[in-house]
Amino acid sequence: MSAAVEPLVSVEGLVKHYPVRGPRRRRGAPASVVHAVDGIDLRIARGESVALIGESGCGKSTVAKVLVGLVPATRGVVRVAGHDVVPVTVRDPEARRRVQLVSQNPWSALNRARTVRHILAQPVLLHGRATGRDAVERRVVELLGLVGLPAEYLDRRPRDLSGGELQRVTVARALATEPELLVLDEPTASLDVSVKATLVNLLADLRAELGLTYLLITHELDVARHLVDRVAVMYLGEVVETGTAEQVFTAPEHPYTRALLAASPAELVIGQLHGDGLVGEVPSAIDVPSGCRFHTRCPFATETCTTEHPLLRSRPGDRAVACLRIDELADVPVAGTPTGRTPQ
Ligand SMILES: Nc1ncnc2c1ncn2[C@@H]1O[C@H](COP(=O)(O)OP(=O)(O)OP(=O)(O)O)[C@@H](O)[C@H]1O
Ligand SMILES: [Mg+2]
């Protein structure tokens, strides 16, 4: 990507802290916060597809919610196509139109009382993408066609649709504003295996056909492998590794990424990785560890890792890694492989 070309999405120093209320707040303790997202930078070129991966609770959906304007950021700058999304005091309808969210649960995302026609016509009208009854009708039929559903579906309601069809309608509704960026937060998590494959293929086709840009959040690494060019790995609110999908999936460098890729899908969803020499449990997002946040679980951690905070540093190729020991560890094969070195 040329430095002169502004990326479609530019996230700088994004922080989102949630105040702790209720039983999670210790008596008499000073007001504490959940460090959901703690200073991430992310650039996504126009037409690029990037995955955010990491264990449950690492802050992926929080990034998604800030990007689509569902929650305000604590600090940082988020720009999409030159329009500020953050700070949220900037109420720019054009920025809102350009970014649309497809989330995990289509059933709760759609108004059950309304027909598919109404569900799709609403954003078309709201964002002025067509005017007049006939033009709006033509557009909703076109939107349904884009997601592979026939016009007969216009008079159906969410309860008349299967899970896969519901998710297609959610995608069609997102496309209604003619967005540039689709934020896909676990889009296939609620679907059966065969339906999942169809949706993944549909998303790949739509991206090519409409020139869309994707930010994909998923625990399903096979889905990410199929859909993205680049990957950012999150741990406890921070990005610890970025690189091309090829680099990250075939030769992960950060000890956390190695463990993540060695984990089973169930471990990823529950957020309890134990493979690849990992020790301990996921620390609390309220009392985050000092130094490198991963040091409490890292099989390679040294004394320095407990006090010094690693920054994301460029590595050979188009990748960056936040690990104080990366120069020593990059060539160490993943533990468990025939040449793997015992962690020390
Ligand atoms: N509204 C909220 N109030 C307080 N804490 C929150 C809120 N929403 C999320 N969190 C906390 O922020 C952290 C990040 O949550 P987030 O939902 O972004 O994680 P995630 O990576 O999307 O997880 P998952 O993979 O389970 O969806 C977690 O510790 C979560 O408990
Ligand atoms: Mg989430």
Image: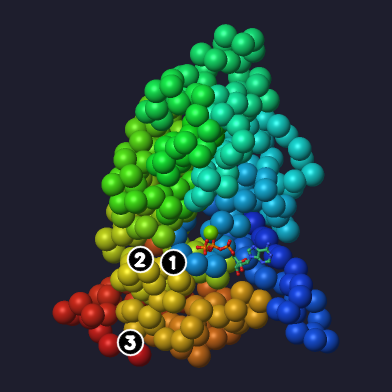
Between residues 134 and 262, which one lies in front from this camera angle?
A: 134
Give me the C-alpha separation between circle 2 and circle 1. 6 Å
**Identity of the residue furthest to the left in this view:** 338
Between residues 339 and 296, which one lies in front from this camera angle?
A: 296
Residue to which mark 2 is pinned: 265
Disc nearer the start of the sequence (3/1)? 1
Q: Does the CB distance between marks 2 and 1 fall below 8 Å? A: yes
Give the residue at x 68% y 61%.
16
Residue 55 pos. (x, y %)? 46, 68
Give me the C-alpha separation between circle 3 and circle 1. 26 Å
Disc nearer the start of the sequence (3/2)? 2
Q: Is residue 203 left or right of residue 240?
A: left
Give me the C-alpha separation between circle 3 and circle 2. 24 Å
Q: Is residue 257 left or right of residue 40?
A: left
Three-letter code for the amino acid on which mark 2 is drawn: Pro
Q: Quadrant of residue 321?
A: bottom left
Give the label, 3 or 1, closer to the camera. 1
Mark seen at residue 269: 1
Give the label, 3 or 2, closer to the camera. 2
Whether label 1 lies within 8 Å of ligand 1 gets the answer yes
Residue 113 pos. (x, y %)? 62, 36
Residue 74 pos. (x, y %)? 73, 58
Q: Which structural element holds mark 1? A: helix
**Is 48 above or below relative to 225?**
above
Residue to which mark 3 is pinned: 343
